[in-house]
Image (spheres, rainbow, N blue to C red):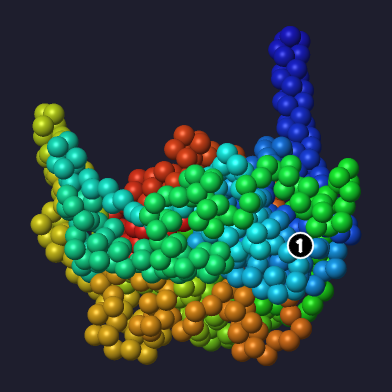
């Protein structure tokens, strides 16, 4: 008996030690993750530097850095904060210029547009903007081409090639292996379902993609050519011929100003700052410069509610989850300090039901305070739908906009099962109790009822658009049908009110609310350290991190779209496309 109690006591002590160790480990992690957060100081004669250590994100929800990645050199910076830093640096006597030293940049096309515009404004101060690259990606060059001078490594190159897209078709593959896909859609341009139905791109989809890519490339290429003082014809020849790949041809065709090593570039900067050869250049990163800003004590707030990612039912942080966003919207509605809300949308859409829930709550918020919408890289399908509560909509010129359409896809493996000797009999209480079956497909009546549901959802979609855009059903139906437009064309056809940035939307929101002494606050806020720790051990988070590590970020997004359980057998408002400058 004494031995029994001794073993029990030993186990209790062991459990206590383990729990205490875990507790102190978490405390250690939190302390380590908060180290270096002291407000940095800006030295005299400094250069604000954008380098490979900076990753541009649109909202706090995209900042998913693990607590255990203590030595991660890449730091996330919100596009809005980067732009504010450039504006502040314009009048900061300690900042003498900006150096862009990045071969690759992880940022959306509209984020690059806005940062580039801010750099153009910065140059009006008379301060310099220089850029240096080795093997430079197309988006990095698009941003860097705004510089007064562009320097390239003599053994480097620039991947300047224009825009393209590949549409993958699955129809033959699915037929070969006996996988069925019942597709119900409204809109001839609703290309999200084309891979299941066709073996080649439809004329309608080819038309919309060609128009979209040419709109975006026209906006992008004209800015590069203007900055580099190259004629449109010469620039087209340069891109078509891939001259940027060869350093000597890059120089010959005016894509760069000089071919020099990085050490020589630093020497050039020292000379510009009147430093001696053995002096150190005071370079400050955007993250450190942003963190040096004084904390605001203003009593009024313009809230920016970021809606980034796929629209989904339920709860979560890394996308737009309806339950959470309903709470965020209600909190902003009831917060007296918040004088106006800017909804920043960067979403291809998703669940029709979740989109409708969010739209309703936004309509309630609009009754109490101004609601202005700003579009990021894309505001398509459900992403466009939730904007229909806005007092005013701002779109970027290159935003993927519209895609007013609805679809439903229901997979089955009936033929595959039959080929392998598997079949199933159904016993049911009602005619359509087994309306969805992986082994028997859809019942005939369920196809009819889902078709009616898709049509009804489309009519509801168009109804809200007609109310917000003050147009007839026929007018919206004509530019709808699932078609995606660039922001520029969306303005021309009346799907948005103005072409402008998030900053423009915030200024208008403040003016409409009569707020003069205000600060800009971002919602939802970044998770605190304790919440991060707790969420890391949830089964969903562990599954997501493991799958993401195996598939990579882009393929994980495809997994979320196609395979996640809460996406199946649901009416969707979703665009299949996002434009990334690569």
Left or right of 410, for residue 30: right
Left or right of 502, for residue 461: left
Tell me where residue 548 appears, x and y as whole percent. Answer: 49, 40
Above or below, 66 against 3 in this view is below
Residue plotted at (77% across, 23% down) = 13
Q: Quadrant of residue 67?
A: top right
Tell me where residue 456 appears, x and y as whole percent. Answer: 25, 73
Residue plotted at (73% across, 44% down) = 264
Depth order, front residue of 474/578: 578
Above or below, 41 against 499 in this view is above
Residue plotted at (14% across, 37% down) = 176
Mark yes or no: residue 397 visible.
Answer: yes
Q: Residues within 10 Å of mark 1 (few under 14, many from 20)?
A: many
Above or below, 523 against 560 in this view is below
Write down the residue under mark 1. Answer: 97
| Secondary element at image label 1 | strand
Q: Quadrant of residue 211?
A: bottom left
Depth order, front residue of 48/485: 48
Tell me where residue 20 appears, x and y as whole percent. Answer: 77, 31
Q: Quadrant of residue 300?
A: bottom right
Left or right of 14, for residue 462: left
Tell me where residue 310 appears, x and y as whole percent. Answer: 44, 58
């Amino acid at each position: 008996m004494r031995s029994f109690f001794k073993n029990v006591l030993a186990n209790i002590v062991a459990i206590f030690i383990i729990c205490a160790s875990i507790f102190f480990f978490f405390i250690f992690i939190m302390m380590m993750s908060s180290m270096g957060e002291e407000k940095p100081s800006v030295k005299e004669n400094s250069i604000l530097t954008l380098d490979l250590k900076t990753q541009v994100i649109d909202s706090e929800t995209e900042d998913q850095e693990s607590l255990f990645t203590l030595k991660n050199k890449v730091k996330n910076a919100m596009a809005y904060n980067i732009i504010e830093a450039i504006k502040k640096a314009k009048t900061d006597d300690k900042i003498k210029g900006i150096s862009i030293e990045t071969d690759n940049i992880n940022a959306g096309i509209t984020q690059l547009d806005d940062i580039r515009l801010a750099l153009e404004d910065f140059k009006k101060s008379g301060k310099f903007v220089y850029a240096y690259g080795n093997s430079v990606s197309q988006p990095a060059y698009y941003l860097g081409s705004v510089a007064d001078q562009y320097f390239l490594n003599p053994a480097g190159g620039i991947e300047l090639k224009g825009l393209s897209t590949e549409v993958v078709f699955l129809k033959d593959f699915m037929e070969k292996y006996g996988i069925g896909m019942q597709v119900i859609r409204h809109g001839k341009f609703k290309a999200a379902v084309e891979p299941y139905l066709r073996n080649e791109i439809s004329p309608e989809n080819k038309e919309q993609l060609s128009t979209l890519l040419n709109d975006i490339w026209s906006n992008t290429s004209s800015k590069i050519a203007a900055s580099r003082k190259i004629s449109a014809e010469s620039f087209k020849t340069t891109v078509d011929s891939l001259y940027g790949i060869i350093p000597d041809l890059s120089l010959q065709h005016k894509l760069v100003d000089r071919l020099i090593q990085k050490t020589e570039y630093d020497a050039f900067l020292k000379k510009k700052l009147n430093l001696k050869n053995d002096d150190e250049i005071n370079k400050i990163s955007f993250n450190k410069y942003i963190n040096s800003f004084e904390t605001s004590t203003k009593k009024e707030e313009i809230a920016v509610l970021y809606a980034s990612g796929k629209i989904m039912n339920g709860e979560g942080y890394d996308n737009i989850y309806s339950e959470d966003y309903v709470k965020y919207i209600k909190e902003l509605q009831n917060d007296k300090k918040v004088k106006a809300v800017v909804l920043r949308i960067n979403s291809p859409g998703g669940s029709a039901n979740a989109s409708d829930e969010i739209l309703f709550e936004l309509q309630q918020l609009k009754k109490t305070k101004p609601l202005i919408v700003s579009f990021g890289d894309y505001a398509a399908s459900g992403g466009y739908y939730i904007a229909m509560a806005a007092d005013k909509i701002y779109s970027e010129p290159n935003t993927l906009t519209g895609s007013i359409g609805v679809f439903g896809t229901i997979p089955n493996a009936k033929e595959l099962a039959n080929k392998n000797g598997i079949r199933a009999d159904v016993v049911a209480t009602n005619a359509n109790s087994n309306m969805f079956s992986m082994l028997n497909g859809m019942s005939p009546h369920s196809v009819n009822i889902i078709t009616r549901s898709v049509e009804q959802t489309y009519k509801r979609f168009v109804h809200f658009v007609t109310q917000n855009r003050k147009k007839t059903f026929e007018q919206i139906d004509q530019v709808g049908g699932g078609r995606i437009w660039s922001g520029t064309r969306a303005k021309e056809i009346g799907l948005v009110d103005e072409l402008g940035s998030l900053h423009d939307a915030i200024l208008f929101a403040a003016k409409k609310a009569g707020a003069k002494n205000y600060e800009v606050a971002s919602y939802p806020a970044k998770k605190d350290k304790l919440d991060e720790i707790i969420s890391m051990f949830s089964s969903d988070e562990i599954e997501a991190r493991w799958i993401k590590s195996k598939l990579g970020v882009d393929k994980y997004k495809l997994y979320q779209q196609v395979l996640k359980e809460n996406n199946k057998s649901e009416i969707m408002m979703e665009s299949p496309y996002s434009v990334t400058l690569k």
